[in-house]
Amino acid sequence: MNIYISNLSYSVDDADLNTLFADYGEVVSAKVIMDRESGRSRGFGFVELADDTMGQKAIDELNGAEYDGKVINVNVARPREERSNGGGNRGGGFNRGGNRGGYNSNRRY
């Protein structure tokens, strides 16, 4: 079972996550996500446990628990959504839609 953990202290690393979840069974992987530019933790990570039943137990017991001075959120990880490479309009910027209202000099009033 793949588990998502958020609101982690920035001092938590992969080994800490591994230790935290080891009580719930075999930890297949434990990864704190790091910022590419700063190299600092982004405050969330993923743990994969070999057994789904123990994974659910870990979620039930650790969600809302305090860890390293912060209350953590622990949930089943959802599959990553595909991102399209085609820019798309993210707000602002140049509008290619033409005149969408206002005065139109080509129109007879």
Image (cartoon, rainbow, N blue to C red):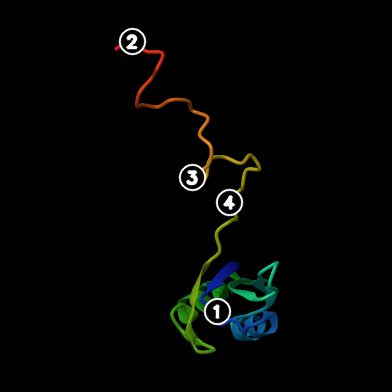
The tag earlier along the polypeptide, 4 or 1, is 1
Residue 91 is marked as 3
Residue 108 is marked as 2
Q: Are marks 2 and 1 in contact (CB under 8 Å)?
A: no
Front residue of 96 and 78: 96
Mark 3: which amino acid? Answer: Gly
Q: Check disc 4 and report its element: helix, strand or loop.
A: loop
Tell me the CA gap for discs 2 and 3: 32 Å
Quarter holding the N terminus is bottom right
Front residue of 107 and 71: 107
Graded by Cα atoms within 10 Å as few (under 14), some (14 to 19) or many (20 or more), the crowding at tag 4 reads: few
Question: Which residue does the numbered mark 4 point to in the structure image?
Answer: 81
Question: Which residue does the numbered mark 1 point to in the structure image?
Answer: 8
Res 41 quadrant in image? bottom right
Res 2 quadrant in image? bottom right
Mark 4: which amino acid? Answer: Glu
